[in-house]
Amino acid sequence: MRSASIISYEVSVVDEPIAFQDGRSYAQIAIVEKFKGANKISSQKLGVADLEKVYSDINKNEELNLSNCYLKDFSLDTYRKLYGLSEGELVNLHSLKADNAFFESDFGTSFAYSNFEGTSSSFAYSIFHKGKVNFGHAKCSSNLNFNRVEFYNEELSFKFAEFDKGDIRFSSCIFDCEDLLFVNTNFGEGNVSFRQTDFRESNCNFQYAQFNNGDVSFDKSIFAGQNLDFRKIEFGDGKADFRRVNFGDGDINFSESEFGVGKISFRSSLFGTGEKKFENVNFGANEISFEGAKFENGLLSFKGAIFGTLSFADSRLNGHCDFRIAKGNVLDLTDAIVKDVIDIQAGVEKVDLKTWKIEGLKNMGKLFLSWEENNAFQLINSQTEISNFGKASQFNLLKETFHQNGKYTSEDKAYVAFKRFEMLSELEEGIREGGLKAIRARLYYGFKWLVFDKAGLFATAPLRVFTSMLFVLCFFAILYIILPHFVHAEIVSSVGDPDGLNLVERSFYHSAITFFTIGYGDYYPSGHVRWLSAAEGWAGVFLMSYFTVAFVRRILR
């Protein structure tokens, strides 16, 4: 009993003649019925081609018109035996037209070592049914059209095929094969199209294929096989378009492939739960776009890759992402959603990344990087087109990341960078508004720069706060020494100065007990030094509190 979703064909041959409008006629009719499950969905009548005549026409190098024909067990291997050609000798096929043809064989349909001559050759809308189909070592110097061809075979091979300058079109094809082999295929200088192609559950192998300088398109194609092997492919200077491709749940491997200078796009593509490997891929200086792409669970690896810009803006990254790249200018994760691990932390191999955009990143997983080894500050500060507010938000995200990973020293550095860019953003906003708001913004920025940043690095450096405390204490002591020479200002002993302290000693002693708000009462300020002592008392309270916060924060972690 047929499965309700499986496409199948049944062919019956009847001894009735059929003639076509182009003058061709055949003694028999092949009735080809198409079923979806148990339901017949179409039926067509084709002429049954006489293979001996076909082989004879090939031998005469005549134009081949096999359109609307049924060919049973067609094979150029058989042709070679009939005409005494050696195995692997090229067979010329002159201006082949096989549109809407039906090729069927239990043993195998072979176009191996064929040479497609003429301005173009076409198999459009044809069907290859049963057995293996072999186009291995085929050659073509013009356009070759496989648009809307359906392959229902055990194996389809284009291994070592060579195409020259023509366009190769597989648009809207159906590849329902166990194995689909384009290994070592040279697609020449023309454009190659697999647009809207359904690869079904075929295991696809494009290893070592060469696409040269034409444009390559897999736009809206669908893969459902377990293994998609694109390793060591050479892409030329044309565009490589994988937009809106559904790669299914199989393992995808582009490792060690090389790209020219053309645009590379995987925008809005869907990647399933299998492994997605782009390891050691040389993208050159290109921009590679995965914008809007969705990655399900499963490893996504760009380990050792080289690129100009790699963008995952607005993408969903649900699996482990290994971005320990060899060299890259920009890694863009703007507005992406992360649900697992993103790893750019250098290990044995150095990670040479110039810029990392994470503005708007929604992190529900973990980010692994090193502040020093990855030069994290420069990764964000190098974004010349991003506002200070945008940089602040990115450093804030790094701060949370380092805290989550227990890297508290790096967390402090990211926090300081966050606060500095936040201050710059607020200053710019005030200046844009102008007037009193601009003046207030500048004063507020100066205050925070001095008190919060320089005095203690935003409570991340207890030793710096302590040093600031000593500096302030000594600063006020020096003022107590200098002021009496110019105005009425002195430190008076309320107990008759039993120790006989000189001006310097009195000034430092008074500065210390005022700064720490001890208030013994044995010395008190008089004259203009009173307001100065009040200011020092406030500074002391503030800096002691500041030190307590910074010290306790460091101890608790």
Image (tube, rainbow, N blue to C red):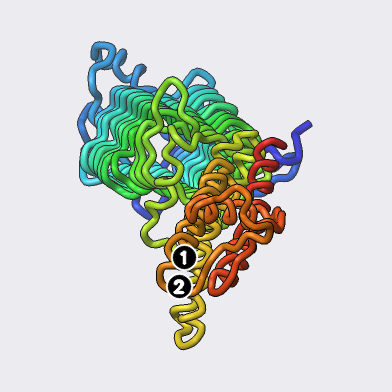
**Pointer 2 local density, CA inside 10 Å: few below 14, some 14–19, many at least 20:** some
Residue 62 visible, this angle: yes
Q: Position of residue 288 (x, y in %)?
A: 40, 46
**Is residue 335 left or right of 442 when viewed as pictured?**
right
Give left or right: position of 486 versus 411: left
**Viewer-proximal residue among 313 and 48:** 313
Q: Residue at x 46, y 88 (%)?
A: 435
Labelled disc at residue 424: 1
Q: Please name the residue shown 62% across and 67% down the image.
A: 534
> Where is residue 167 shown, x and y percent of the image?
29, 46
Above or below, comparing residue 508 to residue 48 in the picture: below
Residue 206 located left or right of residue 521: left
Residue 233 occupies quadrant = top left
Location of mark 2 (residue): 428
- Please name the residue shown 37% across and 35% down the image: 352
Q: Secondary structure at mark 1?
A: helix
Residues under numbered marks 1 and 2 in contact, where contact means CB atoms less than 8 Å apart: yes
Looking at the image, residue 313 lies above or below residue 1: below
Looking at the image, which is closer to me, 254 or 100? 254
Residue at 24% across / 30% down in the picture? 115
Tell me, for residue 402, which label it has, or none.
none
Q: Is residue 152 visible?
A: no
Q: Quadrant of the C terminus?
A: top right
